[in-house]
Image: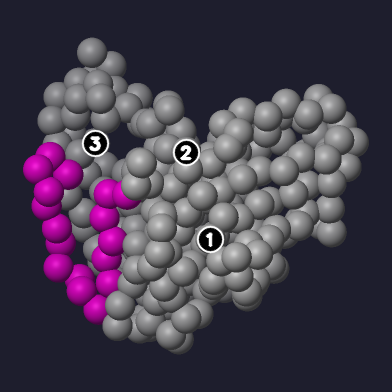
Amino acid sequence: AQKVTQAQTEISVVEKEDVTLDCVYETRDTTYYLFWYKQPPSGELVFLIRRNSFDEQNEISGRYSWNFQKSTSSFNFTITASQVVDSAVYFCALSEALYLDSNYQLIWGAGTKLIIKP
Amino acid sequence: GAGVSQSPRYKVAKRGQDVALRCDPISGHVSLFWYQQALGQGPEFLTYFQNEAQLDKSGLPSDRFFAERPEGSVSTLKIQRTQQEDSAVYLCASSLEGGSALSYNEQFFGPGTRLTVL
């Protein structure tokens, strides 16, 4: 069965600290996609990154970086030098897409609420 | 605008009332998803359309929930005889077409409809 676990319910740090959000996933398939989304207080889901299961190269985008490790089924997200505007709920999600036109629904973790204090 | 829109943004219903939630996907997007997000939780899949065909409705929690997309564009999620446990944010997402092992088409999310059942 597919499952995404975000063990950290809430994290609070002071601005400019680095923070890592953990994500552990379960899937029986060898081909899958992993995602991170941000949900600010306004409620709209903002796409951050997608990673194909065949690509384990870590990615950096500005202050954001992602560490994908298939050996531990983890896809962790780090924010460097956090800012107050980073405060939001962050979701990790998994999708399997094996067949053309299949239902590639997203399986979501419960989310981690990140609070950045000034 | 060019994004996914949903209406109404907020809906308050008395227990037992019927409600209808509307989703306008991005023009030309073939796939449309509905998700339910309870307070403090990650979204959960409800149903999936490819054009006007409802290919998967396995996530609908009961037969009080009904979704349609008669012309392959706008979709309506209807909840009959609402119950308090139906209170949640209902998210709609659309994408170009189905995914495959080699490609993935991004799901774009609307702002959601927050349903409160009293």
Residue A90 pos. (x, y %): 38, 41
- Under mark 1, the amino acid is Ser
Mark 2 belongs to chain: B
Let me know if marks 1 and 3 both belong to one chain: no
Q: Position of residue B56 (x, y in %)?
A: 64, 72
Q: Give the residues drawn in magenta, as a range.
A: A47-64
Asked if marks 1 and 3 touch (Cβ < 8 Å), the reply is no
User: Label for residue B111?
Assistant: 2
**Is label 2 on the same chain as label 3?**
no
Q: Is residue B42 magenta?
A: no
Is residue A72 among what the camera can see?
yes
Number of residues whose C-alpha sits closer than 10 Å to that of mark 1, classed few (under 14), some (14–19) or many (20 or more): many
Q: Compute the Cα span from label 2 to label 3.
A: 27 Å
Q: Closest to the observer: A109 or B14? A: B14
- Relative placement, left or right, of A2 versus A57 is right
Query: Would you name the residue on which mark 1 appears?
Result: B73
Label ID, residue A19:
3
Q: Nearer the viewer, mark 2 or mark 3?
A: 2
Q: Position of residue B22 (x, y in %)?
A: 61, 45
Residue B96, numbered label: none
Name the residue at 84% across, 59% down.
B63
Helix or strand or loop: what does disc 2 sit on? Answer: loop
Residue sitting at x 21%, y 54%? A66
Is A58 colored magenta in this rendering?
yes
Residue extending farthest front: B71
Circle 3: element type: strand
Instruction: Please state the chain letter of the residue tagged with numbered disc 1 in the rendered image.
Output: B
